[in-house]
Amino acid sequence: MKKISENIKISIFMCSAIILGFSIVFALILILEPKLDISSKEKEFFLRVEKFDENTIIILGSSQTASFNATYLENNLLNNNKDYSIYNLSISADRPQKRLSNIDKIIELQPKMVIYGIGYIDFENLEKMKIDKPRSFMPDAQEIFVKLISLEQYFDFDFLIFSSPKYIILKSIRDQVNSKQINEYYDEKTPFLSYDLNKKRIILDDKNLKKNSKEHQLSGIKPQTQNQDVIAFKKILQKFKENNIDVIIINMPFHPYYKQIMPKYYNDFLNKITQNSLEEFDVKTYSLIDEYDKLKIWNDSIHISINEKGISTLNDDLLNILLEHVN
């Protein structure tokens, strides 16, 4: 009985320590890195833009789709006598669960067409694969983090930052110190993203691409019926269908070194999602996964560089897809 009482005291102490730790991290992040909460950019955009022009195309996705240059595409469509407005509403580290929170606002703006770029990383587990642990009275910090993630939909905050508090805080301090040296780029046609142009223009050599691919922590993908991002993705497509918005799904490119380290079922999983989307929601689908395997245009193993070479390569392929459909 005495031992149980001591365990309870230890558990209470540990819970208090964890709560205090999260509180300190949370406060430091808010002070050092106000830009982490990108929802402020979204709110500003939705307040400013009440309704899209009649012929408006929007691009959705994560930082992978940030390489789609809205101005470049818009101008080249116009050169082909196609007058369309294009907005790239990509969000860094976007996932269908996260995107679902603002999809109704996007639909209210009445776009004519949506380009939705997806990849393996959009459906990976938020938590790392768990290792069997012995039962303990001690609280599991990993389980607390996973529960925090599940609360994200109810709060105006991105709880994913707690996946690596140490990294976020160090990055925040470094960015504050080096802020004057960063060539930050912001485009009103890509309102939810801003990034360091100098870094995004880099093309990695073969040695560094190999190294970069090994740094990715693959956390596995749950089956479709248990995968909350798949469920959210289907809800999004259903909403677009109900509002007569055309959708084109594009499977985004990954470097061969990344594809070498990922499990084979990743590819089967994404192909199945794409096929199911085609059958259930009457969307158009294209795959760019293997299109650029041999080209030296990679910023890292999952992103195309935004230098002139990268822009023309990736965007010309999307331009051809658009020309095929806007007719």
Image: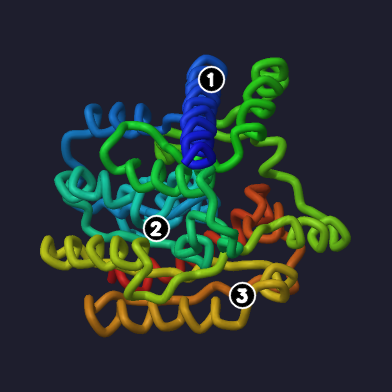
In the image, 252: left or right of 100?
right
Tell me which residue sits at (14%, 46%) in the image. 108
Q: Is residue 170 visible?
A: yes
Q: State whether residue 67 is above or below residue 22.
A: below
| Nearer the camera: disc 2 or disc 1 | 1
* Residue in view at x 54 percent, y 73 percent: 288
**Along the horizontal axis of the image, is 246 left or right of 254?**
left
Q: How is the image coloured?
A: rainbow
Q: Which residue is mark 2?
A: 77
Mark 3 vs mark 2: in front: 3
Q: Quadrant of the C terminus?
A: bottom left
Name the residue beneath numbered marker 1. 24
Gap in angstroms between the C-alphas marked 3 and 1: 45 Å
Count of numbered labels shown in the rendering: 3
Residue at 47%, 43% in the rendered image: 145
Q: Amino acid at mark 2?
A: Leu
> Which amino acid lies under the numbered mark 1 shown in the image of this protein?
Ile
- Contact between marks 3 and 1 (CB within 8 A): the answer is no
Q: Position of residue 83 (x, y in %)?
A: 30, 53
Residue 205, placed above or below residue 273: above
Return the mark for residue 291: 3
